[in-house]
């Protein structure tokens, strides 16, 4: 949406829109500087099909900013069925893209640096573990069994009602 203050500004905007070439989406998506394609529209059925088709031809992310009213359903079901992320308010779209960028930045750094490894155990630690495992605990002395006190006269299978 473009807001203008007066008629002269309206004419300037109209001139710019009339003489500005439409962006070529197939060319844009193949640009190595482009990471995610954001389509902002009210999304008719034909446009939804174009977005889905574009997504299927690339490995880059495609998201949709729904600019139509929530009552308008044309194209929305197709986008949802194709599992294309749909955002309604632009600030949620910005936060979503920021989170995605942060995730992949951390992931790439982690893959480049490697994952942390635990230091080898000392002999004393191995001995303590072996001793603890050797102690064991009899089945009848489990903490749960000792905390369950049965009422006097209770028998297995007897009803309490």
Image (cartoon, rainbow, N blue to C red):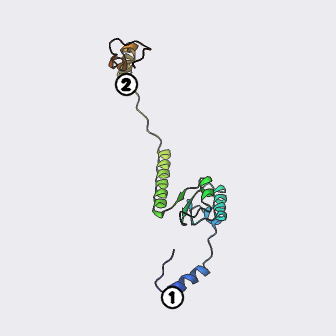
Q: Quadrant of residue 43?
A: bottom right
Q: Residue at x 42, y 13 (%)?
A: 156
Numbered circle sitting on residue 122: 2
For residue 100, say whether it is visible. yes
The mark found on residue 42 in the picture is none
Query: Which quadrant of the figure contains the C terminus?
Result: top left
Question: Residue 39, image x and y in percent?
Answer: 57, 64
| 19 lies left or right of 157 | right
In three-dimensional space, the C-alpha distance between marks 1 and 2, rounded to whole angstroms, equals: 81 Å
Q: Is residue 151 above or below residue 47?
A: above
Other residues around mark 1 within 10 Å, as few (<14) / some (14–19) / many (≥20): few
Q: How many marks?
A: 2
Q: Which residue is mark 1?
A: 8
Question: Foreground: 21 or 40?
Answer: 40
Image location of residue 69, percent across then percent down: 53, 66
Of 17 and 161, nearer the camera is 161
1 vs 2, front mark: 1
**Looking at the image, can residue 138 be seen?**
no
Q: Which of pointers 1 and 2 lies earlier in the amino acid sequence?
A: 1
Give the left or right position of residue 43, taking residue 151 as reference: right
Query: What secondary structure is marked by label 1?
Result: helix
In the depicted structure, whether residue 70 falls above or below residue 111:
below
Residue placed furthest toward the bottom: 8
Q: Which residue is pictured at 64% across the width and 69% down the height?
A: 24
| Front position in the image: 18 or 68 | 68
In the structure shown, which secondary structural element does the residue marked by tag 2 occupy?
A: loop
Residue 63, given in percent of the width and then of the height, sits at 56, 59
**Closest to the observer: 84 or 37?**
84
Reply above or below: 41 against 9. above
Mark 2 residue crowding within 10 angstroms, few (<14) / some (14–19) / many (20+)? few
């Amino acid at each position: 949406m473009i807001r203008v203050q007066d008629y002269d500004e309206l004419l300037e905007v109209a001139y710019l829109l009339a003489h500005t070439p439409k962006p070529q989406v197939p060319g844009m998506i193949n640009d190595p500087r482009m990471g995610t394609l954001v389509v902002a529209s009210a999304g008719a059925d034909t446009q939804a099909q174009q977005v889905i088709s574009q997504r299927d031809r690339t490995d880059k992310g495609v998201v949709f900013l729904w600019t139509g009213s929530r009552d308008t359903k044309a194209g929305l079901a197709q986008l949802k069925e194709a599992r294309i992320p749909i955002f309604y308010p632009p600030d949620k779209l910005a936060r979503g893209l920021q989170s995605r960028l942060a995730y992949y930045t951390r992931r790439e750094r982690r893959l480049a640096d490697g994952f942390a490894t635990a230091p080898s155990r000392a002999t004393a630690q191995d001995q303590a573990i072996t001793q603890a495992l050797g102690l064991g605990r009899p089945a009848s002395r489990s903490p749960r069994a000792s905390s369950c006190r049965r009422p006097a006269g209770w028998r297995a299978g007897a009803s309490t009602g």
